[in-house]
């Protein structure tokens, strides 16, 4: 079993990463001004920057623009949870981002196979990848299942839709089965899941919210399941302190550093426009 093979690695992660954390306090205890970079510039990080509304597009092309690097990509989100899919906005936003950042890839993410199929048929260049957001309790995703074989079947269906147009296929799965014991019985294997698509963006933000040590343990387990870090998968960090899993820049950087101790250097950055300064502080702290 994967779980048994990884127990030693997780214990090692939790022990070794304790010394890396700058804080295990809650977000409200973190300083709010003049945060210093926590990561060395010689440890390059690739970001996928999520954007879910026009205010985010506007902040990205202004406040965050100085910190964008050619290896980064942008993930435009529409049709998440119970919201309708807005193809017109996706195509307009993608064109605006491509005009400002011609060297960066633009992706689209949506929830549910119905929305995924509409997106695959309706997105335009420069969009080159559709990401299947896969998590429980979303009205747009009635097909979600904790059963891993059923999950693989759903991801296969999404991948076939994307590849048929042809577009790259990505999946953004819940990260709960990674470390949450009540879900171990379903035996999720993110390495197997990742083999079904071109890229995987694991929703690990809840582990960063808990503390950097737990985020490091999640990185250790993902490395074990995928076999090695690489370009095909990323871990998510949320720079939206008002959300249930969001943190401030200091804690986000500590989480990234904990993951880097396992040679993980690709992250999906979720953020909200009111906290664009936190997102910018995180990006700057990566040595940009």
Image (tube, rainbow, N blue to C red):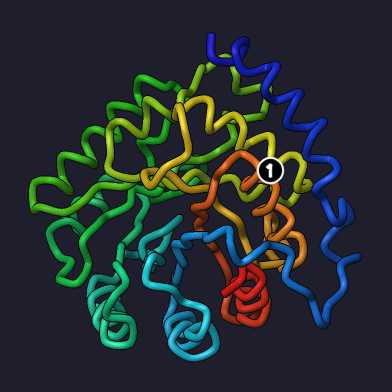
Instruction: Determine the residue positioned at 58% across, 62% down.
Output: 42
* Residue plotted at (25% across, 52% down): 116
Determine the residue positioned at 38% across, 40% down: 142
The 10 Å Cα crowd at callout 1, few under 14, some 14 to 19, many 20 or more, is many
Dot 1: what SS? helix
Q: Position of residue 156 (x, y in %)?
A: 24, 32
Above or below, comparing residue 3 to residue 256 in the picture = above
Residue displayed at 29% across by 33% down: 154
Residue that numbered label 1 is attached to: 215
In the image, residue 25 lies at what x, y percent?
89, 55
User: In the image, is residue 256 above or below residue 39?
Assistant: above
* Residue 107 falls left or right of residue 55: left
Question: With 112 as the anchor, is 119 left or right in this view?
Answer: left
Q: In this view of the protein, which residue sits in the foreground, 82 or 31?
A: 31
Image quarter for residue 48?
bottom left
> Which residue is more in the foreground, 42 or 95?
42
């Amino acid at each position: 079993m994967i779980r048994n093979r990884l127990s030693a690695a997780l214990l090692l992660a939790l022990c070794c990463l304790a010394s890396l954390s700058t804080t295990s306090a809650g977000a409200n205890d973190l300083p709010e001004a003049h945060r210093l970079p926590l990561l060395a510039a010689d440890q390059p990080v690739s970001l996928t920057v999520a954007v879910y509304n026009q205010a985010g597009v506007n902040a990205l092309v202004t406040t965050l623009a100085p910190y964008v690097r050619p290896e980064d990509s942008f993930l435009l989100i529409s049709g998440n949870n119970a919201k309708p899919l807005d193809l017109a906005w996706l195509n307009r936003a993608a064109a605006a981002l491509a005009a400002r950042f011609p060297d960066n890839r633009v992706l689209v993410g949506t929830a549910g196979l119905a929305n995924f199929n509409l997106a695959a048929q309706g997105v335009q260049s420069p969009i080159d990848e559709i990401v299947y957001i896969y998590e429980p309790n979303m009205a747009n995703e009635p097909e979600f299942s904790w059963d891993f074989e059923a999950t693989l079947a759903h991801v296969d269906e999404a991948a076939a839709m994307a590849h048929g147009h042809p577009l790259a296929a990505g999946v953004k799965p819940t990260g709960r089965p990674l470390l949450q014991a009540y879900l171990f019985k379903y035996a999720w294997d993110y390495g197997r899941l990742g083999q079904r698509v071109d890229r995987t963006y694991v929703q690990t933000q809840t582990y960063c919210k808990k503390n950097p040590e737990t985020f490091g343990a999640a990185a250790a387990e993902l490395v074990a399941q995928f076999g090695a870090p690489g370009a095909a998968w990323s871990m998510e960090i949320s720079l939206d302190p008002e959300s249930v899993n969001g943190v401030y820049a200091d804690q986000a950087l500590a989480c990234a550093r904990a993951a880097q101790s396992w040679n993980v250097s690709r992250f999906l950055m979720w953020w909200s426009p009111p906290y664009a300064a936190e997102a910018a502080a995180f990006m700057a702290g990566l040595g940009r």
